[in-house]
Amino acid sequence: MLKPSLIGSDTQLNQQSYYEASVQRPAALPALQESLVADAVVVGGGFSGLSAALEMAQRGLSVVLLEAERIGSGASGRNGGQAIVGYASGQGPFEQQLGSADAQRVWDMSLEAIDLIDARIAAHGIDCDRVDGYVYVADSARKAAQLREEMDGLQRRGIEVDWADGADLPRLINSPRYVAAAREMRSGHLHPLKYALGLARAAQAAGVRIFEHSPVTALQRGSTLVASTAQGQVTARFGVLAGNCMLAEHGPQVAPEIAPRIMPVGTYIVGTAPLDPELCARLIPRNAAVCDNNFVLDYFRFSADHRMLFGGRVSYTTRTPGDLKALMRQRMGEVFRALRTVPIEFVWGGFVDISMNRAPDFGRLGDNLYYLQGFSGHGVALTGLAGQLVAEAVAGQAGRFDVYARLKHRRFPGGPLLRTPSLALGMLWHRLRDVL
């Protein structure tokens, strides 16, 4: 039985989603109310934090994980559920900064990130509605040419691509909005909150101590780290900051030097009532996840119970767009005319983190404090790999982590007061380019 949806205020949008309504969470874990000593402390209970904690525990370290709210309450538990090969930035930043050999290494690791999801699902019995298949779509001739170039690049890297356009298009997607589509089977989709809760169970089974409602308010650095919460503290040899854009909200003084390199971007999703399975199969054959190649993009898929989960309508101003339900219905109806009048039962949204160049931002603060951020919409797969790389580095095998850490990242311009308006103006320019 699904719990009723909440549609309305910003607070409600962040509290309820189709994902929250379709799981039975365990009772909340207690807040930290004591002083603990551990080998490692992890800040953030999303995919990257849970992955790092699990991997370190499996290597024999004692680990404490501190989550400001509930496990998966941030982007990890409410995103589009699309697990995608590659990077939001493309290969450009890697090739320019790292050279061809290491650029190929990070590409190969993005494939490994997909495989890691499936390995963890199998190893820990995580039931999270995992489906293979991803369709990229273009809504103009110019965008179709760009998509063809991108798909040619995937094929050169060994990804098999099925292309369709013109009268052949309904074989991949049945929509009047698009002029071309391409499908590959390495990417896919899943129920992100089920996956996050499954990772949490696996981490606990491996010995990780998890505390919810325990935001870190201060972090003392040095050869030993001390992470403080309102009622307790954790002393550890190593630390992992995995809060992304939520870290600055809950603990703005924890790592102020890395906060300017990411920007919180609001993204929103609607969930319809359950649809006729035959209609779903006709609109998106083989039940793939779908994303267009506009700069300000739409992304969508069907859930396991045949609801359309349609996302997009990003906000770069930290303000939720007005009349969000109507706006999202209009965009969904432009893609699938058969869905113009179907009931919308869920509307939700929240922030994801993007970096200036859309490449992931991994690194160290000192010798023993690691951070993972800047997933830029590709976090469902890449976060899991990031946690594994941190665990390798803590265990003394930092080679793979350091490939990413060599990437240089710029701060968003404008400082704390002006960087959000500056980004909003820049995104308006890109949006105009999409429609011209």
Image (cartoon, rainbow, N blue to C red):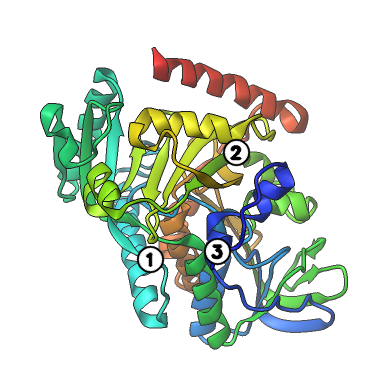
What's the residue at 60%, 39% (across, down)? 266
Question: With 44 as the anchor, is 36 left or right in this view?
Answer: right
**Which of pointers 3 and 1 lies earlier in the amino acid sequence?**
3
Is residue 21 at all visible to an observer of this figure?
yes
248 lies above or below 44: above
Quadrant (top left, top right, bottom left, bottom right) of the C terminus: top left
Q: Earlier in the sequence, mark 3 or mark 2?
A: 3
In the visual, does 138 lie left or right of 155? right
| Number of other residues with Cα within 10 Å of mark 1, as a class: few under 14, some 14 to 19, many 20 or more | some
Residue 74 location, quadrant: bottom right
Of tags 3 and 1, the one toward the viewer is: 3
Residue in the foreground of this view, choosing between 380 and 325? 325
Where's residue 418, x and y in %? 73, 25
Q: Is residue 361 left or right of residue 239?
A: left
Towards the viewer: 385 or 176: 176
**In whole angstroms, how far apart are the C-alphas of marks 2 and 1?**
27 Å
Specify the label residue 129 is tagged with: 1
| Mark number, residue 2 | 3
In the picture, residue 119 is in which quadrant? bottom left
Amino acid tagged 1: Asp
**Labels 3, 2: front one:** 3
The residue beneath circle 2 is 265
Q: Position of residue 191 (x, y in %)?
A: 45, 61
User: Compared with residue 277, is residue 97 higher up or lower down, i.e. above or below?
Assistant: above
Say how many tags the image has. 3
In the displayed orientation, state which residue is furthest to the left: 168
x, y percent for residue 433: 42, 16
Secondary structure under badge 1? loop
Between the residue at mark 3 and the residue at mark 1, the CA separation in whole angstroms equals 16 Å
Please tell me which of labels 2 and 1 falls first in the chain.
1
Looking at the image, is mark 2 or mark 1 nearer the viewer?
1
Circles 3 and 1: CB atoms closer than 8 Å:
no
